[in-house]
Each structure stands twice: as structure tokens, then as C-alpha cells.
Image (tube, helix red, strand yellow):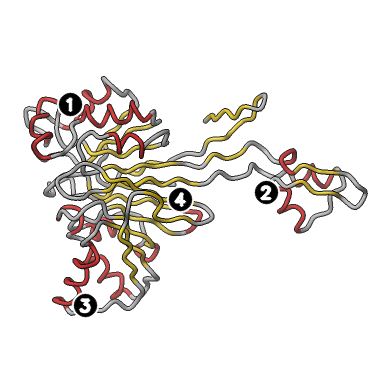
Amino acid sequence: MQITFLGTSSGVPTRIRNVSGVALRLPQRAEFWLFDCGEGTQHQILRSDLKISQLTRIFITHMHGDHIFGLMGLLASCGLAGNAQRIDIYGPPDLEDYLKACRRYSQTHFSYPVKVHTVRPGVIFEDEEFTVSCALLKHRVPAFGYRVAEKDRPGHFDAERAAAIGIPPGPIYGRLKRGEVIVLPDGRQIHGAELCGPTQVGRKLAYCTDTIYCDAAVELARDVDVLIHEATFAHQDAELAYQRLHSTSTMAAQVALAAQVRQLIMTHFSPRYAPGNELEVKDLLAEARSIFPNTELASDFWTYEISRRELIELSGVGISCQ
């Protein structure tokens, strides 16, 4: 799982930061998912190593323009390129009406299936590999945070050891890898778990923007590997944050600390902290690290790899480790 930041500014783009957009690349599936789609996102995708043809799902947090103004253009381009497959879009109420209006007044017709899912708190998507859930955050309009949880996988199956103890190759290996207990023709009972390495713990990601500090963000981010959280304002501008229902750097760090996440990545920075100003984004990093040391700043086109962990069974107790 790879995170690529396509836009890390709040409100308006700057010379070095576009407005909101984050891609989650799933190499094992040859696809990527997009979180928010501010104006210019398709240009950012073209400048990255992502392939638009591999876009399958889009998750929109809320209906403010810096999070949706690039959506219709991206969808239209996917159709004109002729290589789009089905795209599922998840978002708040009014998203479907917005897209219908855009299509009607621009006379745009998609040449591929587009399905809009209106989300509610809870699980919004699940397949054999992933579960995606959302929670209602605290902003001026309905805004949702998203959590992507990869399901645990069995450890590596030791085929050589299985052959050495006389288990013939075939479909039985698949059953053993799934941890099943099988009985061989000679009466021996084999526990699949004994032939597999440590369980590979599913990776977890939370994406929270736009919001002020709230308990819902903490619960959504509980124990994730990576929390992407907005940090629109510096701590000294907390009054602005409360007025506009955005987070400060210290609020983002407090969410990460309370949720016991492994890595905090801050994004959605106000242009007022551009290089050369009295306060810069690097100052927001220092503020956050004073509360949650494992914090990084996102920048456009930065890619972060979420690594796997293994679950080691020790005296019946599962312990996860890097």
C-alpha cells in the first residue's frame, strides 16, 4: 500500500501545493483509490507515476470546492481516454445531485459505469481483502473521515516442509495455507497453521479532513498504521480554527496520541504558512512533534509506503512487530 499526496493545501492552491487529493495505490490489485479530488487533481495524477486507467474508487469527504471541483473533469477525462472501467464514488448527501447537474449542463456522457454511493457512518465497502468505513466528523458541512483496513493474511506456507512430511501437492495446500485442519489418507491430522509463518497483519489507514478535534476522529483512527489528518492552522491561530471548524497542528497530534496511531502525516495547510512568512509549515511540524513525535509533513507528490507487520504468537498471546 502506497500513499501519494496529490494536493496538500487548504482552500486554494499555491505555487507548490495543490488543493486536496490523496491516492492510495494497491499494487497487488493494479489499482488505486482516490480520496478527495480538488481542482487540478487530474493534472497532478498525470505528473505522478499513477495511471488514471487504474482508478477504481473515489472517496469524497465533503462538498466544499477544494475537495470536489476536480471530480467532474477527472471523470470526463477518464471517459474520453477510453480506458476507464467502472468507477465507484463514495461521499456525502448532495454528491450525486452535484454530479448529475454537472453532467446535464455540460452535456457530458460517461462511456463507462459510474456508481455514486451516499455514505453513512459505518462500513461502506468490503471485499475479500479490504474493509472501508467512515465516520461523521465536525465541520461546517457534513464531512466524513475514512478508514481503510486491510484484512489479515496467513503467513507464508512452507511447501518444502509439507512435501517432506509426505503431503502431496494440490488443492490441499490451499486449505492448509488457510489454516484448516486436514486428515491425510494414513490417518494423520495436520494443522495448517503449523506449516505457515507468522500471520501478516493487515495495514490500516485513516483519512480525516476537514474537521476540528473530535472524538469521532479518534475512534476512526484507533490503532492505524498511518493517520492522515488536516492541520490547517498553527497552534497560535487556534481561534481561527474554532471559528472555521478546522484543526491546528496540535489538534492533529492530539488525535494521533489519543488514537495510538503509529504514524501521523499532516496535510491541508493554510497558504498563510508559505515559505518566507512569519510562521511556516515547518513550525507546525515542530508544534505537532512536541505532542506526537512520529509526525511528518505531507508535500505534493510525496509517496509513503505502509509496510506490513507480522503477528507472532507467544504463549497464546498475539504480539505484532515490524
Give me the C-alpha separation between circle 2 and circle 1: 49 Å
Q: Where is residue 110 in the image (x, y as percent from the top left)?
A: 29, 76
Give me the C-alpha separation between circle 3 and circle 4: 32 Å
Between label 3 and label 4, give the one nearer the viewer.
4
What residue sits right under mark 2 in the picture? Answer: 178
Instruction: Give whichever of discs 2 and 3 has the lower sequence position.
Output: 3
Give me the C-alpha separation between circle 2 and circle 3: 47 Å
Horizontal arrangement in the rendering, residue 150 relative to residue 142 (left or right): right
Q: Where is residue 240 in the image (x, y as percent from the top left)?
A: 8, 34
Residue 106 against residue 176 in the figure, above or below: below
The label number, if any, that marks residue 108 in the structure image: 3
| Amino acid at the residue labelled 3 | Thr
| Amino acid at the residue labelled 1 | Asp
Instruction: Give whichever of discs 2 and 1 has the lower sequence position.
Output: 2
| Amino acid at the residue labelled 2 | Arg
Could you tell me which residue is drawn at 14 percent across and 46 percent down? 140
The label number, if any, that marks residue 131 in the structure image: 4
Give me the C-alpha separation between circle 2 and circle 4: 19 Å
